[in-house]
Amino acid sequence: MSTVLVLNSGSSSLKYQLLDPASGDVKITGIVERIGQAKGSVTQKADGETIERDVAVPDYREALAILGRLFEEVGRPIAEAGITAVGHRVVHGGDVFTQPTLVDDDVVAAIRDLIPLAPLHNPANLTGIEVGREFLDVPHVAVFDTAFFADLPEVASTYAIDRKIAAEHRVRRYGFHGTSHEYVSSVAAAHPAVQEKLAAEGRTPDSLRQVVLHLGNGASASAILGGRPMDTSMGLTPLEGLVMGTRSGDIDPGIVFHLMRSGMSGEDVDTLLNKKSGLLGLSGESDMRELRALADSGDGAARLALEVYLHRLRKYVGAYAAVLGGIDVLTFTAGVGENAHPIRSGVVRGLKYLGLTIDPAANESRSDDARVVSVRSGVEAPLVMVVPTNEELAIARQAVEVTGG
């Protein structure tokens, strides 16, 4: 058995998955939460069994030790699990890392140098790499959220500020969720309905115009032409773009200066825009399921939050249709995109002028497979699709490519 261990290290959590990159079969999946706090927890699923425990997790070394003990408990000791590589999710690769990279000491140092670009994410990602290398003596591969968007057209990646200052401080649109956007857009492009559409129109795959909406607590949109990203909603940081669970998305930059002149510190404004805004700031609730329940009960703030959320989504789909010169496929993915059918119908409801439609029965049905949820009114009509993302599988396969495993 040949497997890859995928680690996603957050500021206080460690998500992990052991999987076969060839078949996509998941052997073990789990999460260690509240690392560094007085009381932590672990949840692991393997062979249909779920283990849930409260545990002390003072640091990442103990988190990985817990992982090792649980692997052995379900009969897969780390040394016997056939692990050929460890794949690490790293949020920001800056202009240094544009593809999956085999980790060595120089790579670790370079990721550390990029911390100013992602102070909320890269430190935890780096800790996971450093401790992971001590824990498991196999090749480690860093897979960067920004890599897929590294070759954005300059017109899309460039901010209209003084170019010398931008160069000095590495200011450009980097984009995030790239692993998901790349995986999902490729799965959608290979779907039989999309292939049939291209064939009926006598077009080649490199002409496929796709807008992908990755909608979770964090949310981003991308415009993709023939597999190549042409634009994306997140920018220098993951704060730009869509309305998210706790992030504001696009705002007038002058708001920052206004708040600071009014007495808020830079750190206060940072916390406000990243952790206390978005759906949470508008309604007091960041979870889409809870928010929709509040809205259905008549809560005015929740209803407004949903409308603001949908309004921003429709703006981006329309803008990206303009960037691409039309749209062939609108693809929804991630937790909200895959599971909240009212959000999908709410987005499409305002986009009939683009030819986009929703089939209510298909939209409301649940499936783990990539599927079309638009009205099948002819092969030339634009498609609306739901494609479950699988960032862990994408990371595992990229790790195998890098290591030759």
Image: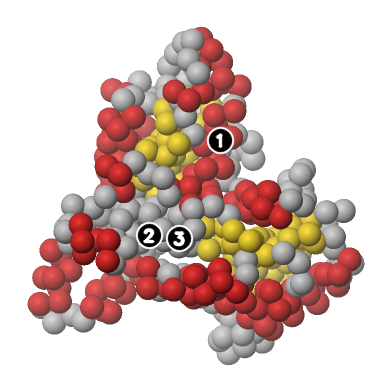
Q: Nearer the viewer, residue 251 or 339?
A: 251
* Label disc, if present, on residue 96 of the rendered structure: 3
Residue at the spot of label 1 = 186
Q: Which mark is residue 396?
A: none
Residue type, label 1: Ser
**Which of the 4 image quarters holds residue 168?**
bottom left
Q: Nearer the viewer, mark 1 or mark 3?
A: 3
- Which disc number belongs to residue 238? 2
Residue type for callout 2: Pro
Name which of mark 1 and mark 3 comes first in the sequence.
3
Q: From this view, report whether residue 211 is shown above or below residue 254.
A: above
Give the SS element for disc 3.
loop
The quadrant in which residue 232 appears is top left
Residue in the image at 13% along x and 63% along y: 254
Which residue corresponds to the image point at 52% horizontal and 43% vertical from the top-left? 182
Q: Secondary structure at mark 2?
A: loop
Q: Position of residue 151 (x, y in %)?
A: 41, 45
The residues tagged by marks 2 and 1 sit, at their Cα atoms, a distance apart of 23 Å
The three-letter amino acid code for the residue at tag 3 is Val
Cβ atoms under marks 2 and 3 closer than 8 Å: no
Where residue 20 appears, as percent x and y from the top left, is: 77, 51
